[in-house]
Image: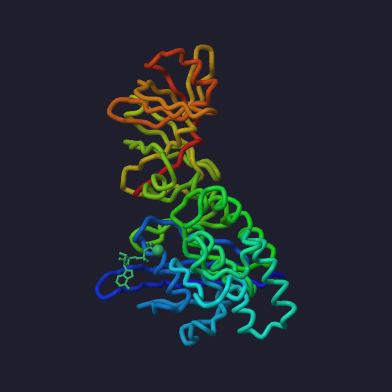
């Protein structure tokens, strides 16, 4: 059994004056889950963490820890591990003393403090710098000390606000791995804020995409990528192609739904297939999202994957294993990722046929 608590954010709305920073946020994080809050700057990520931590009161709704409303519990009694953006270390304490602080506060025996602190220092790769003061460290080093201080006492709930923002790429990768390992080993429930998609994907059991204070989708990384809930999520998660579909006709078959409609892309009928639960009986005309890597070059003698369209390649960028292309089909400008083998088969031709599978699409209504 892990130590993690269950966190429920129940219909939380937060106003700053008349400005609505969070609107009707609903999240459930199961014990031991690692959840990333992903959104652009100003979307309300830090505000949400502050409300969970108790630094800000919500205007409406509640926060439950293991099913109990924490509104009445002052934040210092909530036993939440926290790393906020302005990771204020105690300036008069050394690295080791900063990390030991939460353990001292909890009256952990001296020998155990010293062993846990040295483990943490090794984890954050600052061995040898134990006796430095914060002012003698770089920004990235300070951030790692703050991270160690937040984790060292095994909090049942850990809140991280852009915990690796000050680190360069290689170190960030190492730390992502370490944070994931430690939180999973101990079963801490962790909520981590980031604007870095790759970080969210590599670390999380679930991702919560937030925009303008509203949850756009709360789901597993696979679903967020493959089954985006709306156009915002599809576009936010990387270059995708959004294609309108007219006069859509639906045909349900068990858990699947075949959709056929007119598309400018194919200059005629287009066939799609998605899980039936992704379909809404909506008066709105749907769009579909088509990932750049779901589009394949259709060469002589090769079998079509179901849909065929013609496009003119206008740009290509060689990236080693694959080539990113832009192509025009009618008024649509598409992003297409070809692997190097496919790209070679182009032999310099610009106007070519492409194909995609009806199941490699996601249907969207808003
Ligand atoms: P993020 O962390 O996603 O960048 P924040 O949660 O910090 O976003 O801010 C969300 C919105 O709320 C922003 O528009 C910000 O300007 C506003 N905001 C944040 N804190 C306050 C505050 N104390 N008073 C008024 N507005 C605030
Ligand atoms: Mg923030």
Type of colouring: rainbow
Residue located at (54% from left, 28% from top): 321
Residue at 69% in and 66% down = 119
- Which quadrant of the figure has residue 317? top left
Left or right, residue 23 beside residue 219: left
Q: Is residue 232 above or below residue 343?
A: below
* Picture mark count: 0
Quadrant in which the N terminus appears: bottom right
Using the image, determine if residue 77 lies above or below residue 177: below
Residue 87 location, x and y as percent?
Answer: 47, 69
- Which residue is more in the foreground, 19 or 363? 19
> Furthest-left residue in view?
18
Q: In front here: 102 or 35?
A: 102
Percent of width and height locating residue 69: 50, 82
Q: Is residue 311 above or below residue 186?
A: above
Image point 55% across, 20% down: which residue? 341
Residue 260 shown left or right of residue 225 in the figure: left
208 horizontally vs 170: left or right: left
Q: Position of residue 165 (x, y in %)?
A: 47, 57
In the current view of this chain or complex, which residue is farthest to the right?
A: 111
Res 186 quadrant in image:
bottom right
**Taking the image as four quarters, which one is ligand 2 found in?**
bottom left
């Amino acid at each position: 059994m892990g130590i993690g608590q269950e966190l429920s954010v129940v219909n939380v709305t937060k106003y700053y004056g008349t400005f609505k920073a969070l609107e009707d946020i609903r999240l459930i994080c199961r014990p031991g889950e690692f959840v990333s809050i992903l959104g652009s700057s100003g979307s309300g990520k830090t505000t949400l963490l502050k409300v969970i931590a108790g630094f800000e009161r919500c205007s409406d709704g509640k926060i439950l820890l293991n099913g109990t409303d924490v509104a009445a519990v002052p934040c210092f009694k909530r036993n939440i591990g926290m790393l906020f953006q302005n990771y204020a270390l105690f300036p008069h304490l050394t690295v080791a003393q900063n990390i030991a602080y939460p353990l001292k506060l909890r009256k952990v025996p001296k020998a155990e403090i010293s062993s846990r602190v040295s483990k943490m220092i090794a984890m954050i790769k600052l061995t040898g710098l134990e006796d430095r003061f914060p002012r003698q460290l770089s920004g990235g080093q300070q951030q790692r000390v703050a991270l160690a201080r937040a984790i060292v006492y095994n909090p049942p709930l850990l809140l991280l606000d852009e915990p690796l923002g000050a680190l360069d790429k290689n170190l960030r990768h190492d730390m992502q791995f370490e944070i994931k390992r430690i939180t999973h080993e101990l079963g801490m429930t962790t909520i981590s804020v980031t604007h870095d998609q790759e970080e969210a994907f590599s670390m999380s059991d679930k991702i919560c995409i937030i925009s303008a204070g509203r949850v756009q989708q709360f789901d597993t990384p696979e679903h967020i990528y493959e089954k985006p809930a709306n156009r915002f999520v599809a576009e936010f998660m990387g270059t995708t192609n959004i294609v309108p579909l007219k006069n859509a006709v639906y045909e349900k078959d068990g858990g699947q739904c075949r959709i056929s409609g007119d598309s400018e892309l194919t200059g005629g009928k287009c066939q799609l297939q998605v899980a039936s639960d992704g379909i809404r009986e909506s008066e709105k005309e749907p769009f579909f999202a088509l990932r750049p890597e779901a589009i394949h070059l259709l060469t002589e003698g090769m079998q079509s994957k179901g849909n065929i369209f013609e496009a003119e390649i206008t740009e290509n960028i060689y990236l080693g294993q694959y080539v990113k292309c832009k192509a025009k089909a009618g008024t649509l400008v598409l992003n297409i990722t070809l692997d190097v083998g496919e790209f070679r088969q182009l032999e310099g031709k610009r106007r070519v046929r492409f194909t995609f599978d009806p199941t490699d699409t996601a249907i969207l209504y808003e």
